[in-house]
Amino acid sequence: MTATYAAVPGVVETREALAETTLVVDPARIVEACTALRDAHGFNFLSDIAAADYLGWGEDGVAGYVGTADGRDLNLPSTTGLARLPEPKPKRFSVSYHLLRVSDDPARVRAQVWLDDGESVPSVIGVWPAADWFEREAWDLMGIRFDGHPNLARILMDDDWEGHPLRKDYPLGGEPVRFSDED
Amino acid sequence: MPSSRIYAGSRIPTRVPTILDVDPEKHNLEDILTVNFGPNHPSTHGVLRLIVDLDGELVAGIRAVLGYLHTGFEKNMEAKSWWKSITYAPRIDYLSFQANELEYVLAIEKLLGIEVPRRATWARMALAELNRIHSHLVWLGTSALEVGAISMFWYAFDDRDQVLDLFELAGGTRLHTRYTQVGGLAEDVPPGFTAEARKLCESMPRSVDEYEAILDRQAIWLERTKGIGLLSAEDALALGQSGPVLRGSGVDWDLRKNMPYLFYDQVDFDVPVYFNGDVYDRYKVHMDEMRESVRIVRQCLDRIDETEGEPWIADDRKVVLPPRHELHTSMESLIHHFKIVTEGYRVPEGEVYVVIESPRGEAGCYLVSDGGARPWRVKFRAPSFAALQATATAVQGSLVADMVAVAASLDFVMGDADR
């Protein structure tokens, strides 16, 4: 199975986990890779584009006895934290393209690129028109910039919204309430 | 380079695939009247806003604006334990709550590698198919209402109520049942459920026949649905359409058949496919699917009866709540209960993408876990979000009055699209 994707251009790593195939692709060559996956491998259906933010990944640390110099900190239950540290991620953001082959021989594959804050990835809107809103959503909520997208505007948040709400450094709640008396 | 036509004959707009710009060669730009439609309008199935450029009664340009129902489900779920975050999933698509709950729970179970008892799987399938009937009935009622067939709305909602009665019987609530738990079900299928559900299976095909008798001999309905809202098979695939829209465009594709999950490979049913890609064919797919769902429900009910007395949830005390009666006598059960409710269980590190065939089609859940007690990232692939991408392609060239019928035929739920 893995060998079949060896000829896809730009693939830097192939992973098999939980019965799913992940192709890690060089961001600069994502359009090339996606075109090859569509034309040579028949992935004619873009199911989803999912961005994830890994800021603070694994920083919870390993669970255990939580002590300070003055003794045990009662506000930190000894069981918070992880059973073991997760595998470190290469960069802050991942963008996963979930592809589907709609044919008699159906298959799914995940093409994944890794980006740091401020880095952009070429748009795949020319490969699958369905990428239009998926990329706008990733830009709106996660702040991933897609080069060459003809209309990379916010889609779910207001046009004048500041920040990208699904980033890990964006607080949950506490956003200013509009039209309140305070300002 | 981007969004150039990817094959000949496509109707997908070229500059941006989801925005239809007024073509100055076909329309006199001075005649164009730009109308704002929605977001608050009875026929928008929620809060969809369409900005329409009209040339007389012809739709010359169209652009969908969404986000009015964005509630940040995905962000909120990251802050809750796995156990609590299940509550959010059904509320995203409020018409196919069982499907959303199921897809999220299946994703957690895939990360956990937990085995689900067969009785629970049969019950999940029965509920998922009942939910499909429920969702299609609401679609039918509201879509017919929008082109003036008001009586359909009352008939469809009457039958819908019977489906909700079954959900109430099973899970205690009519909507957002949260009956699906990681590992199985929240409670065993209650006594009398299968008998009540069989009554519905008796009446439902008759009802569908009646609906078709009302609509298929109705000249207005036929005039307003046939040959409008065209979407070719290639365009539908390129725009990420799924479910009844894709099958109405002639693509024989159903995840239940093509990539079976649960026990769909063990039940007997057909996948309806129609080839004209218009509103009428999408309606036919919905009607046939209700009949097929009844067939599947019947088979599931037989299996539920056969597995009477078998466990309905996995026996894994680190993940599954202990039985209620043990809490009064067993210290360990009390501790497990306390730990699962307060702190939650941990889910092994990994990423999964689980997709099921919801009433609206390809409903996916991308889930990342860091091995902790809360999801690291939850992303739903909302079929309604993808469906709305086809508005510009399907509506182009139609009359403004048909725009409502075409948009409705794409079968979207704004809660699902905006999340």
Image (cartoon, coloured by chain):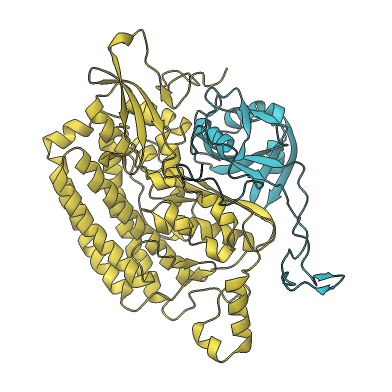
Chain colours: A cyan, B yellow
Between A60 and B303, the residue placed more toward the observer is A60
Which residue is most to the front?
A182
Q: Position of residue B261 (x, y in %)?
A: 50, 56
| Residue depicted at x 35% and y 50% | B270
Would residue A9 be seen by someone viewing this image from the given angle? no
Along the line of sight, which residue is nearer the eye, B328 or B306? B328
Tell me the quarter of the image containing the N terminus of chain A. Answer: top right
How far across and down, in percent of the image, does residue A156 sit?
A: 48, 38
Examine the rendered structure and indicate whether residue B211 appears above or below residue A73.
above
In the depicted structure, whether residue B176 falls above or below residue B240: below
Q: Residue B63's quadrant in the figure?
A: top left
Q: Is residue B417 left or right of residue A136?
A: left
x, y percentage for residue A96? Answer: 63, 40
The vertical placement of B311 against B397, above or below, is: below
Q: Quadrant of residue B52?
A: top left
Query: Whole-percent x and y of residue B204?
Result: 23, 59
Q: With respect to residue B288, does B395 lie above or below?
A: above
- Decide if residue A137 is on the left or right side of residue B158: right
The residue shown at (77%, 71%) is: A73
Who's the residue at 31% across and 43% down the image?
A: B45
Which residue, as the protein is rendered here, is positioned at the far right? Answer: A69
- Residue B106 seen anywhere in this rendered image of the structure: yes
Front-most of B402 and A140?
A: A140
